[in-house]
Image (cartoon, rainbow, N blue to C red):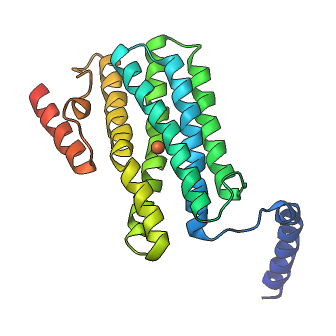
Amino acid sequence: MKTSTKTGTKGRASDEARTEPRESAMKPAVPPRTDLLYQTLETEMGGVDIYTAALKCVIDEDLREEWEMYLEETKMHVEIVRTMLERFGLDPDAQTAGREVVRAFGKTLVCAMQTALSIQPETAQIVAAECVTLSETKDHANWSLIGRLSENVDGIEQEVLEEAYELIEDQEDEHLYHTRGWARELWRAQLGLPAELPPPEEEAEVTSEEEAVLVQKQSEAHRG
Ligand SMILES: [Fe+2]
């Protein structure tokens, strides 16, 4: 018992010593709802950089056209989220710990694509499709939460969240499901497997997870 207590005390002391500098550098906590909005803004801002980098890796003309459109839509999403924050009386340029993490994630994806440019073009294009898919997965998750949140609040908060959600909802679905399809089909083509390009999700104009699963199953059955 004694040994255990002593060890425990020692452990706490060293933990405190290790965490002290971090605590002094910590940003003030923000309420979870506010954190979600700042993370959403940073995801969209990172998305602009990610599409810009992805367009340097793309070789398929259909995919280039798709990503050029998504880049423009993402720039618009940045403005929508900035306006949403301002309507809540929040400074869109304020920095929070949550958005810093999201920014680091986005920079890592851009860095991965820059690295991929030094390998063969077909592989770099797949890396770009995977990076866009990863970023859009977070983006889609943010907006899904905003949509659910808007159903559980009222007054001006509901109005602001709902308005923004309705403006971007369909576009976010398309960004994620279509690019995910591209990543899968480009990989299949690279592996010498039967591939469908543009992917079936794009041809069928998929806008939900259920539709994506269905279209993928139908496509697999067709290919045998
Ligand atoms: Fe977006």
Quarter of the figure with residue 18:
bottom right
Q: Give the residue displayed 24% in from the left and 21% down from the top.
A: 195
Q: In this rendering, is residue 181 above or below 92?
A: above
What residue is drawn where x is 37% and y is 26%? 66
Q: Is residue 149 left or right of residue 104?
A: left
Q: How many marks?
A: 0
Spot occupied by residue 139 in the image (x, y as percentages of width and height): 47, 48
Q: Residue 68: x and y, percent?
A: 44, 25
Q: Is residue 152 visible?
A: yes
Which quadrant of the figure contains the C terminus? top left
On the image, the x and y values in percent for residue 47 come to 54, 38
Q: Is residue 208 left or right of residue 93?
A: left
Q: State the residue in front, 51 or 182.
A: 51
Quadrant holding the N terminus: bottom right
Q: Residue 181 occupies which quadrant of the picture?
A: top left
In the displayed structure, 61 sits above or below 82; it is: above
Identify the residue at horizontal 37%, vertical 29% (top origin): 183
Q: Residue at x 54, y 57 (%)?
A: 84
Q: Position of residue 191 (x, y in %)?
A: 33, 19
Q: Is residue 26 left or right of residue 100?
A: right
**Viewer-nearest residue: 143 or 6:** 143
Whether residue 224 appears in this view of the structure is: no
